[in-house]
Amino acid sequence: MAVRILLVDDHPVVRQGLRTLLEGRSEWEVIGEASDGIEALEKVGSLQPDVVVLDVTMPRMNGIEACRLIQQKTPGLEVLFVTQHDSPQMMREALAAGARGYVVKSNLARDLLEAVEAVSQHRAFTALARNPQVQC
Amino acid sequence: MKLRILLADDHEIVRRGLCSLLQKHEGWEVCGEASDGREAIEMAKQLKPDVVIVDIGMPHLNGLDTTRQLLQHDSAFKVIVLTITDSDQVIREALNAGARGFVLKSDAARDLVSAVEALQNNRMFFTPRVNDLVMAGFLDKGHTIARNEPPDLPILTAREREVTQLLAEGKSSKEVASLLNLSTKTVETHRSNIMRKLSLHSIRDLVVYAIKNNIIQIQMPPQLNGTTEGTLA
């Protein structure tokens, strides 16, 4: 069965880029897009994805807050952060909010597919650009 | 014959999105992708694209200096600048650098195709805010755009601006020398000249200058107890 993915980023061009990368894998399906945390919460409810690919910095509601609320509403739903913040502190915030994965935008071509695969199998995947990749 | 477009942005995911957007347009092709300004200039010289799309916030050589250098090399280049902000200062610098199109990254999915079409037809493309500022400046003999600009800055040469950016990005003189194919001694001379011209006393001062003057852009973390505007730096 296909892994159903929701993309959340405030920039349509980034969503388009993510979609292009993810749709290269036949076993994955991008079922929807959202442009901020509030819309993400609505779409999690209506579309019931398996994985949410979530940006941190967004208008109206940022990704960290959205992740906390997603976990309250749908415990166990897998969240992968995709962000420009190459920061251990931000990564800790993301994991504390309930995310399973964290990758930085500058390394997406290298990390995204592996991260989605790990997270969809309920394995953690974190990789900062400046630090060695950590996989659990 | 197809319109050939060169894309320069340091984020591959953004390039993928832009490529996908542009290649839907029949008659256009993305002939090359560059991940920083220096690579963009080299590729533009080789590929001679009809349109060059450059992100402002690129490492090693930012989009504004890339535009300046491209047009210095060949004034026929048509450049669209992609930016996360349309502040007065960025608009002024982009126009002064010679950009013929100005598109906000957040609106790129909507505006970029129109911008390329405009340049293809030898017109310019600006966001409504840029148009307003240009018109206001024209009606006010240029004073409106200039109103919020910083006081006259000492003029750095193109090479000094490159060195400023690389030093502000945290590179050592040796690393800068290696990137620019210069001797370390030459870089040290540039560094002294920059500090003297700008009346700066430390690298910290240089970083502040580079941020204030859009030579480098920084990423601000969101306020985690509230909401923030998105950035794509």
Image (cartoon, grey):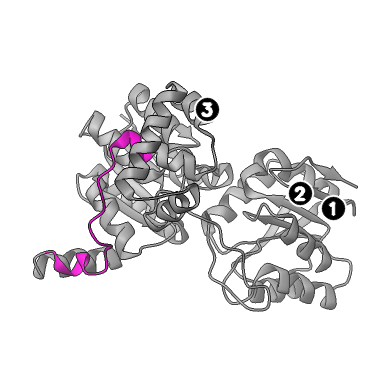
Mark seen at residue B157: none
Q: Is residue A116 left or right of residue B58?
A: right
- Residue at figure coordinates x 78%, y 47% from the top left: A115
State the image coordinates of residue B102 (x, y, percent, origin top left).
32, 54
State the image coordinates of residue B104 (x, y, percent, origin top left).
40, 59
Instruction: Report the amino acid beneath label 3.
Output: Lys
* Camera-nearest residue between B161 and B57: B161
**How far apart are the alpha carbons under marks 2 and 3?**
46 Å
| Main SS category, magenta section | loop
* Camera-nearest residue between B213 and B29: B213
Mark seen at residue A28: 2
Q: How crowded is mark 3: few (under 14 residues within 10 Å), some or many (20 or more)?
A: some
Q: Is residue B49 left or right of residue A48?
A: left
User: Label 3: which residue?
Assistant: B174
Looking at the picture, do discs 1 and 3 lie on one chain? Answer: no
Instruction: Report the amino acid beneath label 2.
Output: Trp
Range shown magenta? B142-161
Q: How crowded is mark 2: few (under 14 residues within 10 Å), some or many (20 or more)?
A: some
Circles 1, 3 touching at the beta carbon (< 8 Å):
no
Mark 1 vs mark 2, foreground winner is 1
Mark seen at residue A120: 1
- Residue at figure coordinates x 83%, y 78% from the top left: A73
Looking at the picture, do discs 2 and 3 lie on one chain? Answer: no
Mark 1 vs mark 3, foreground winner is 3
Q: What element carries label 1?
A: helix
Q: Total of numbered circles in the picture?
A: 3
Instruction: Report the amino acid beneath label 1.
Output: Ser
* Camera-nearest residue between A38 and B180: B180
- The mark that comes first in sequence, 1 or 2, is 2
Quadrant in which the N terminus of chain B appears: top left
Q: Mark 3 lies on which chain?
A: B
